[in-house]
């Protein structure tokens, strides 16, 4: 595990900024949303060009400005900033250079609302209060992303009628692929659960954990260890919040088909990728309670000024999962979540928000390296996105109008938090690799600032109704 660092040495990308769509402005209409969940059928030749592997990376709570704040901290400049009156007819993004590798990929915006909701791009840039109503939670967003079906907040893997719906992990297995989930928060939390379980409440952690353990997933990595606190210190009395004692015991004692891992050295062994050390299936739970780093004790004035936990990081978990899943010649689906970006957003904690976005970005870099050394962009589709924005992060004195964040490299940006909850903004949707051209055919509207957007059901729709469709 490499020590965390400010990442100030990364150079700016010289590639041109992605040009967003230029379709006419307008609110989402019933006609525009009619295609959500039902993409046009793919031809046989198009289907043959689909992805063998899909890596779906979700920065939970990471809106445009979470990424922008991190980029300011790293380099002193950024893009995605907006300045001016709350008037969607005149607002536009200020210029800026890419900092992260994935910022030069294809980019669309992503609407995130739950069942019964909507995204109104005119209202979103006219009324700050509108954006703070009707937001999804991670359960409904995760379910939409994993299944292609909208559902109610708090619900995992069931549609709005309460019926169980197939997720991408299940479709991957049904098509001969492997499947896995990785998270920096408890493995049975909402986002990883959405790719693995079906439950009326995201808070039924024990039921969700049991279903995940008994599922066909090949990799489950996350936090939520019952024997450790948020400082990675051994508890006198274990707390079985995210998994029952019985399920933990059958995992740790080898009573399941999973190779059990909870030590840093276990994850490192998987990440090195030596064949003799790679199991077919692995369950890994980091020695920490709720988050790898965000929940540790202490108040951070700057990123990393409070000593971090000596536990596995998200890049190592991601590399380990890819090596295990990559043993399947038929391919795999892997969901990787930077889950504690959301937790930092709820806390309006700028320093730890930057830490968590950087850990997520490091994981993205590790995955890119894996694709380019162990696979290829011709056979692997990679997505970097979010399930929703958290904290209404923006510039200082942002309301009633819009102001940009500013800052110098190595310093916390000048910014403001305007909520402690989720918001109904669009979030960035970056993508590259096999089959990625299909997403450009699924645009449902145009945001006056962020450009063309797709719905959060789009990946599941394109895969399950197209590239990974089952024969009748």
Image (cartoon, rainbow, N blue to C red):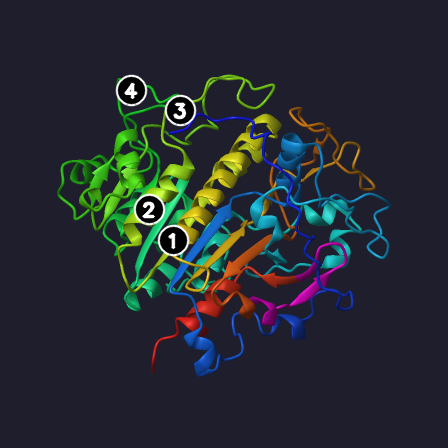
Gap in angstroms between the C-alphas marked 4 and 1: 30 Å
SS type, badge 3: loop
SS type, badge 1: strand
SS type, badge 2: helix
Which residue, given by chain and number where applicable, does mark 2 sit on? 321
- Badge 4 vs badge 3, beta-carbon distance below 8 Å: no
The residue carrying pointer 2 sits among few (fewer than 14), some (14 to 19) or many (20 or more) residues within 10 Å by Cα, namely: many
Front position among marks 1 and 3: 1
The residue positioned 42% from the left and 66% from the top of the image is 51
Gap in angstroms between the C-alphas marked 1 and 2: 8 Å
Please say whether residue 440 is one of the residues in the magenta stretch. yes
Q: Earlier in the sequence, mark 1 or mark 3?
A: 3
Query: 272 and 385: which one is in front?
Result: 272
Q: Position of residue 80 (x, y in %)?
A: 71, 46
Q: Earlier in the sequence, mark 4 or mark 1?
A: 4
Q: Position of residue 146 (x, y in %)?
A: 44, 58
Specify the quadrant of the image occupied by residue 296.
Answer: top left
The residue carrying pointer 4 sits among few (fewer than 14), some (14 to 19) or many (20 or more) residues within 10 Å by Cα, namely: some
Locate the C terminus and report the quarter of the image it occupies: bottom left
Residue 373, label in figure:
none
Answer yes or no: is residue 263 visible.
Answer: no
Q: Is residue 371 left or right of residue 21?
A: left
Q: Earlier in the sequence, mark 4 or mark 2?
A: 4
The segment highlighted magenta reads: 439-452
């Amino acid at each position: 595990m490499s020590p965390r660092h400010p990442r100030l040495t990364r150079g700016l990308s010289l590639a041109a900024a992605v040009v967003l769509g230029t379709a006419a402005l307008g609110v989402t209409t019933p006609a525009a949303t009619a295609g959500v969940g039902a993409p046009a059928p793919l031809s046989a030749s198009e289907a043959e060009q689909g992805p063998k592997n899909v890596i779906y990376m979700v920065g939970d709570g990471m809106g445009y400005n979470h990424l922008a704040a991190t980029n300011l901290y790293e380099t002193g400049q950024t893009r995605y900033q907006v300045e001016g009156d709350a008037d969607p007819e005149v607002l536009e993004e200020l210029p800026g250079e890419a900092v992260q590798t994935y910022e030069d990929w294809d980019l669309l915006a992503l609407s995130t609302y739950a069942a019964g909701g909507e995204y109104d791009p005119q209202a979103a840039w006219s009324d700050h209060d509108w954006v703070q109503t009707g937001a999804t939670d991670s359960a409904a967003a995760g379910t939409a992303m994993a299944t292609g079906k909208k559902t109610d907040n708090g619900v995992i893997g069931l549609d709005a009628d309460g019926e169980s719906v197939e997720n991408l992990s299940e479709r991957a297995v049904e098509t001969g692929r492997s499947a896995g989930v990785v998270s920096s928060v408890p493995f049975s939390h909402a986002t990883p659960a959405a790719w693995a379980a079906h439950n009326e409440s995201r808070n039924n952690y024990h039921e969700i954990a049991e279903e995940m353990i008994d599922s066909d997933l090949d990799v489950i990595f996350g936090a939520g260890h019952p024997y450790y606190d948020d400082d990675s210190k051994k508890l006198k009395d274990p707390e079985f919040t995210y998994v029952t004692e019985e399920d933990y015991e059958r995992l740790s004692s080898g009573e399941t088909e999973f190779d059990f891992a909870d030590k840093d050295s276990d994850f490192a062994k998987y990440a090195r990728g030596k064949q003799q050390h790679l199991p077919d299936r692995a369950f890994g739970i980091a020695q920490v309670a709720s988050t790898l780093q965000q929940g540790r004790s202490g108040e951070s004035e700057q990123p990393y000024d409070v000593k971090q936990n000596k536990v596995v990081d998200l890049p190592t978990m991601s590399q380990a999962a890819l090596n295990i899943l990559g043993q399947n010649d038929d391919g795999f689906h892997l969901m990787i979540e930077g889950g504690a970006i959301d937790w930092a957003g709820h806390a309006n904690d700028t320093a730890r928000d930057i830490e968590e976005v950087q850990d997520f970005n490091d994981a993205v870099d590790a995955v890119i390296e894996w694709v380019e050394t162990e696979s290829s962009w011709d056979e692997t589709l990679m997505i970097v996105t979010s399930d929703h924005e958290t904290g209404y992060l923006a510039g200082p004195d942002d309301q009633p109008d819009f102001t940009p964040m500013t800052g110098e490299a190595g310093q916390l940006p000048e910014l403001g938090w305007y909520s402690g909850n989720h918001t109904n903004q669009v979030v960035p949707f970056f993508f590259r690799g096999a089959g990625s051209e299909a997403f450009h055919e699924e645009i449902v509207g145009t945001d006056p600032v962020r450009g063309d957007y797709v719905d959060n059901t789009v990946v599941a729709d394109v895969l399950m109704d197209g590239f990974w469709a089952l024969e009748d």
